[in-house]
């Protein structure tokens, strides 16, 4: 449990660095996210205990996954820059719906009553989040923010599905190689798009993104390492729901206490329902 708590803190620090950079420098963020992917990739090089091998099939899955990683990292950066820290973390956690639906429909994975209850709770949470009534909130939901959240949900779902397919073919044999290719491809893609669309901000970004991007990437790697370590002590069926639900609650505490974001009563109730739904989705 101590390791889980430390892991949650590390991932929160990563998200806070991403938000800080976006709010402070207000740049596109392609180069910044490329640095994050680069340092996250380095972790998987260092953590590999055998000889790295790259079969063609793993390279193909990794190449497809790299597109989703690039989209997910950049979209998360945009969401934190454009909208609420707490709401962004809540809505992106609902991305678990898509891979769960894929598992039920296409992989014929077993479901429980909790799965269907979670679907209903997520819909209720979304309704309460958007129905304001006469209450006021400091959180303005813009179209660009909604678009960013949508891309995060789609990319995270695709990452989970591609990962499941790759695991079904190769198991854990080439796990590090798969992630190395995914993150390396994302790094290259973000650099290319950065030079195409954000060339004017390169000098400003490169001056700051190396430090903040490296820190965020290192925290990402530490979080992955702690997750792997906790699997040696506790079952995944326990760790996943605890981390998901607690992560949402912690994100909202950070947004309220540190960032002074205000939410309506309905939004706070929605957060509680959403956290419960994510927990139930993992049972």
Image (tube, grey):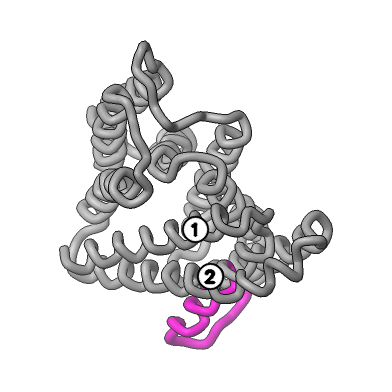
Q: Is residue 116 in sight in this rendering?
A: no
Front in this rendered view, residue 279 or 55 = 279
Name the one closer to the observer, 256 or 183: 256
Q: Is mark 2 on a helix, strand or loop?
A: helix
Q: Earlier in the sequence, mark 1 or mark 2?
A: 1
Which stretch is magenta? Answer: 37-54
By secondary structure, the bulk of the magenta-drawn segment is best described as: helix
Residue linked to disc 1? 20
Magenta residue check for 38 = yes
| Residue 75 visible in this rendered orientation of the protein | yes
Q: Residue furthest top?
A: 133
Instruction: Please give the name of the residue rendered at 55% of the width and 75% of the height, measured from the top-left corner.
Output: 211
Pick the front one: 261 or 275: 261
Q: Residue at x 75, y 70 (%)?
A: 203
Count of residue discs: 2
Q: Is residue 98 above or below residue 247?
A: above
Residue at 43 percent of width and 58 percent of height: 16
Which corner quadrant of the image does residue 123 belong to?
A: top left
Q: In this view, does 230 lie to the left or right of 82?
A: left
Contact? badges 1 and 2 (CB < 8 Å): yes
Q: Does the magenta stretch include residue 249?
A: no
Q: In the image, residue 205 lies at what x, y percent?
A: 68, 67
Q: Helix, strand, or loop for circle 1? A: helix
On screen, residue 145 versus residue 160, left or right, reads right
The quadrant holding residue 144 is top right
Give the residue at x 48% y 78%: 43
**Quadrant in the picture for residue 196:** bottom right
Indicate left or right for 179 with 276 as reference: right
User: Is the residue marked by circle 1 packed among few (<14), some (14-19), or many (20+) residues within 10 Å?
Assistant: some
Q: Name the residue under label 2.
A: 212
Q: Quadrant of the N terminus?
A: bottom left
């Amino acid at each position: 449990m101590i390791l889980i708590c430390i892991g949650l803190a590390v991932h929160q620090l990563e998200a806070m660095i991403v938000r800080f950079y976006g709010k402070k420098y207000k740049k596109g963020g392609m180069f910044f996210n490329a640095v994050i992917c680069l340092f996250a990739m380095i972790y998987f090089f260092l953590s590999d205990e055998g000889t790295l091998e790259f079969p063609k099939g793993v390279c193909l899955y990794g190449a497809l996954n790299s597109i989703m990683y690039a989209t997910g990292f950049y979209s998360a950066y945009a969401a934190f820059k454009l909208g609420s820290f707490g709401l962004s973390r809540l809505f992106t956690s609902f991305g678990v719906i898509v891979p769960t639906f894929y598992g039920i429909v296409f992989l014929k994975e077993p479901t429980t009553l909790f799965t269907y209850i979670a679907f209903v709770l997520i819909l209720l949470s979304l309704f309460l989040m958007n129905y304001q009534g006469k209450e006021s909130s400091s959180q303005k939901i813009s179209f660009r923010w909604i678009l960013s959240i949508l891309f995060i949900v789609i990319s995270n779902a695709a990452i989970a599905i591609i990962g499941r397919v790759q695991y079904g073919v190769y198991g854990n044999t080439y796990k590090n190689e798969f992630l190395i290719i995914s993150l390396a491809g994302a790094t290259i893609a973000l650099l290319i798009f950065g030079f195409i669309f954000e060339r004017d901000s390169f000098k400003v970004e490169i001056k700051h993104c190396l430090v903040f991007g490296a820190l965020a990437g290192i925290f990402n790697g530490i979080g992955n390492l702690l997750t792997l370590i906790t699997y040696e002590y506790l079952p995944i069926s326990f760790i996943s729901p605890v981390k998901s639900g607690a992560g949402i609650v912690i994100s909202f505490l950070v947004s309220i206490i540190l960032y002074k974001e205000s939410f309506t009563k309905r939004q706070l109730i929605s957060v509680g329902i959403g956290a419960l739904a994510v927990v139930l989705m993992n049972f």
